Image (cartoon, rainbow, N blue to C red):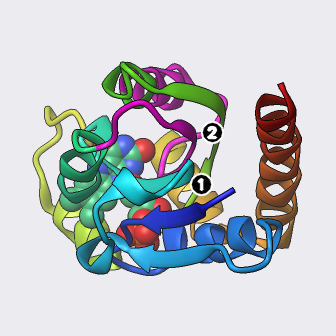
Amino acid sequence: MNAAVVYSSRTGNTRKIAEAVHSVMPAGTDIFPVEEAPEPASYDFLALGFWVDKGEPDAAMLAYMDRVQGKSVGLFGTLGAWPDSDHARDTMQKAVARMQGNRVLGTFICQGRVDPKLIAAMAKMGPNNPHVMDEARKARLAEAAKHPDENDCAAARKTFAGILRETEGLCAG
Ligand SMILES: Cc1cc2nc3c(=O)[nH]c(=O)nc-3n(C[C@H](O)[C@H](O)[C@H](O)COP(=O)(O)O)c2cc1C
């Protein structure tokens, strides 16, 4: 099986998960930041990773996803929100919907430290803005700042090891 991990990462969180995913892929699997990724056509399986930007996979990964057709894929992402929130679920659903014409074998999402510059900008916004810096947001951002951690990496490895077993089934079938 010809496989690649392609990820988009501004500040390194998604890259960390990409490296964890890559560690359980078959020997010889390629790994690329999306800016350097070759066209997807030559791969049978793609693990695609994004950071969440305004409730969607980031634009660079969306553009790459749109070029993937007829493949088996696994999706992973990192975000500032709680990973079990509606926001996280909605975002991953958007990512899965974007993969129409492909076979999505599994997904993984976890928190990732939010860029302190964005936090500072949010803190300066007025009290009526949707990103108001209340106690709940502060707690969420404080937790996000600890991620991705070793548990997240282990969970990503587990998810993708399971996805790979499915691809073996597909190849055998
Ligand atoms: C411009 C910008 C927009 C973001 N939008 C969201 C968002 O809509 N929802 C969310 O949960 N996190 C959001 N985040 C947080 C990032 O998705 C999160 O910190 C992610 O782990 C960054 O990954 P990276 O280090 O791979 O770039 C945003 C961050 C930035 C900088």
| Kind of element beneath mark 1 | strand
Residue 39 image position (x, y, % from top left): 28, 61
Tell me, yes or no, if residue 127 can be seen here: yes
Residue 62 lies left or right of residue 27; in this view the side is left
| 145 magenta-colored | no
| 79 magenta-colored | yes
48 over 102 or under it: above or below: below
Quickly name the residue at label 1: 111
Distance from mark 1 CB to nearest ligand 1 atom below 8 Å: yes
126 over 70 or under it: above or below: below
Quickly name the residue at label 2: 83
**Mark closer to the chain start, 1 or 2:** 2
Residue 155 image position (x, y, % from top left): 84, 53
Displayed quadrant of residue 90: top left
What residue type is disc 2 on? Pro
Q: Observer-nearest residue: 149 or 108?
A: 108
Q: Observer-nearest residue: 72 or 53?
A: 72
Residue 64 lies left or right of residue 128; in this view the side is right
Residue 42 image position (x, y, % from top left): 42, 59
Q: Residues within 10 Å of mark 2 (few under 14, many from 20)?
A: some
- Residue at horizontal 50 percent and vertical 43 percent from the top: 81
Displayed quadrant of residue 122: bottom left
Residue 18 lies left or right of residue 91; in this view the side is right
User: In the image, ligand 1 is in what quadrant?
Assistant: bottom left
| Kind of element beneath mark 2 | loop
- Residue at horizontal 22 percent and vertical 33 percent from the top: 130
What residue type is disc 1 on? Gln
Q: Give the alpha-carbon distance from disc 1 to disc 2, as whole Å.
A: 6 Å
Q: Observer-nearest residue: 87 or 96?
A: 96
137 over 7 or under it: above or below: above
- Residues shaded magenta: 68-94
Disc 1, disc 2: CB below 8 Å?
yes
